[in-house]
Image (cartoon, rainbow, N blue to C red):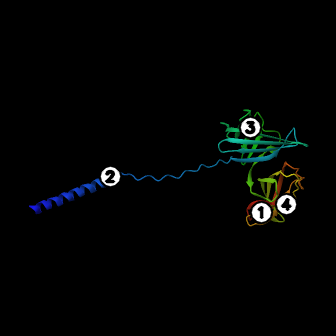
Amino acid sequence: MKQTMITLSFFTMLLSSGCDNTSTSSLNEKVNLPEQPSKPIQAKIPDWVGHYKAFIPCDACEKKLISLRLHQNKTYILKEISFFKQKIKQKESSGTFTFDEQNSNLLQLMDNKTKQNRYFSLHDHSIEPLDQNKNQFKDFEKYQIPQVQNIEVNNALKYVDIQADLFKSEKIESNGIESTKLTYFFEINNNSDRPLKLRDSDIVLVDAKNNEHISTIENNPISPIKPHKTQHELVSFIYAESHQPAYINIK
């Protein structure tokens, strides 16, 4: 009798164990593993995003510098510097811009403060100011404002801040060698108490192989920059195409 009870108990344990395994297996099948988070897709930055900078003609002054920054969120910062014989006037505005529905190359800038509109025509890596009727100015070729690229400036001068933007890149032939002429737009802020003098040999372009290329200043020599004044100059470098420019060194 005892042997029969032991045998029945053993079979009961086996049946219970089998049920537990089936139950556990069913639960495992129902549990879904967490999905791996997908990598965020980086939005491509539009070609028109960037900094546009150049001198343009001015009827009421000697020349005018336009500096326009277009941001990806469709906001802008516009700086206009008018140069007179004895003084400089600077104006800065900011706001939002939209693309014309019928002409995607037409930009309308709206000043946040004055609510006034300005119009620009967008070209391939350049921008052109238009009048209030959205028409080109006379001699519109002189109103083309290229998209510039900033380059690092290693400056050894105290109390002087210098920024440089690539203004133009040209293929030329120098001494029978195919070369590149890079023209940079310099903004030189003399925060010292003394006039600043810069010569060609003081400004050097250093390429990726640490070769140095002495500058060629368009308005050579640079007229002394008065204390606590800002001056804008076009500075060029000619070098062989084999190495990319790395930075500009101010000695």
Q: Which mark is residue 119?
A: 3
How many residues crowd mark 3 within 10 Å: few (<14), some (14–19), many (20+)?
some
- The answer to whether mark 3 and mark 4 are in CB contact below 8 A is no
Between marks 4 and 1 in the image, the one whose residue lies nearer the viewer: 4
Hey, which residue is sitting farthest left in the picture? 1
- The part of the image, by quadrant, that contains residue 120 is top right
Residue 235 at what x, y percent from top left? 83, 55
* Lower sequence index among marks 1 and 3: 3
Instruction: Indicate the secondary structure of the residue bearing disc 3.
Output: strand
- Residues 47 and 163: in front is 163
Q: Which mark is residue 202?
A: 4
Q: Nearer the viewer, mark 1 or mark 2?
A: 2
Left or right placement of residue 166 versus residue 15 in this view: right
Where residue 16 appears, as percent x and y from the top left, is 22, 56
Residue lying at 68% horizontally and 38% vertically, measured from the top left: 96
Which amino acid, by three-letter code, is at mark 3? Tyr
Residue visible at 74% across and 61% down in the picture? 246
* Numbered disc 2: secondary structure: helix
Q: CA distance from mark 3 to mark 2?
A: 66 Å
Q: Nearer the viewer, residue 89 or 227?
A: 227
Q: Quadrant of the C terminus?
A: bottom right
CA distance for labels 3 and 4: 40 Å
Comparing marks 1 and 3, which lies closer to the viewer? 1
Residue at mark 1: 206
Give 109 or 89, whichever is nearer the viewer.
89
Q: Secondary structure at mark 1?
A: strand
Residue 27's disc number: 2
Residue 141, image x and y in percent? 80, 45
> Which of the two labelled residues, at mark 1 and mark 2, occupies the earlier sequence position?
2
Disc 4 to disc 2, how far (Cα)? Answer: 77 Å
Q: Nearer the viewer, mark 3 or mark 2?
A: 2
